[in-house]
Amino acid sequence: QVQLVESGGGLAQPGGSLRLSCAASGSIFTFNTMGWYRQAPGKQRELVARIGDIGNINYADSVKGRFTISRDNAKNTVYLQMNSLKPEDTAVYYCNLDQYRGEKYVYWGQGTQVTVSS
């Protein structure tokens, strides 16, 4: 089985920064993508950023230039550095792991609240 444990959420002021971490444990395959999604109240879950095992990265347009995703393969950990935070970044952020071995296996973290407010 696979477990994803998130940390680093909380309250930040507009213009501030937060850093999220997500550590994966269990049966981790070589070929995988790790990422972050978010869900605001009344809205659908949306992609924030994701990074593949070879370092290929995708960002949502709304966070480009403000958020940076990175990973430490030795620790099976993905990070999301969030700068220049805006109130519209307020959401529950979920860590995601997609693994590939013949088929796709999808795992989610429990979610961490990020609130941007003055």
Image: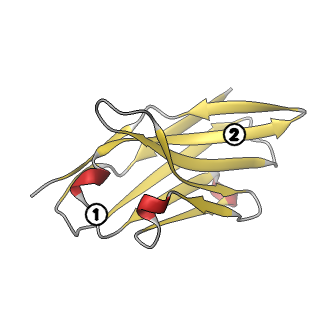
Please identify the residue farthest to the left as the structure is shown.
118
Q: Is 97 situated above or below 66?
A: above
What residue sits right under mark 2 in the picture? Answer: 98
| Image location of residue 117, percent across then percent down | 14, 54
Disc 1 from disc 2: Cα separation: 27 Å
Mark 2 or mark 1, which is nearer the start of the sequence?
A: 1
Residue name at image x 32 percent, y 49 percent: 9
Count residues near mark 2 (Cα–Cα under 10 Å), then give few for <14, some for 14-19, many for 20+.
Answer: some
| Image location of residue 77, percent across then percent down | 58, 53
Mark 1 against mark 2, which lies toward the viewer?
Answer: 1
Residue name at image x 55 percent, y 37 percent: 4
Mark 1 vs 2: CB contact within 8 A? no
Q: Is 96 situated above or below 78?
A: above
Quadrant location of the C terminus in the rendered image: bottom left
| Image location of residue 71, percent across then percent down | 61, 61
**SS at mark 2 in the image:** strand
Q: Is 113 situated above or below 14?
A: above
Count residues near mark 1 (Cα–Cα under 10 Å), then give few for <14, some for 14-19, many for 20+.
Answer: many
Q: Nearer the viewer, residue 67 or 61?
A: 61
Task: Tell me which amino acid carries mark 2.
Answer: Asp
Residue 84 lies in quadrant? bottom left
Q: Is residue 104 left or right of residue 81?
A: right
Q: Is residue 32 left or right of residue 88?
A: right
Residue name at image x 44 percent, y 73 percent: 65
Task: Tell me which amino acid carries mark 1.
Answer: Leu
Coloured how? secondary structure
Please identify the residue farthest to the bottom as the structure is shown.
65
What residue sits right under mark 1 in the picture? Answer: 85
**SS at mark 1 in the image:** loop
Q: Is residue 40 left or right of residue 28?
A: left
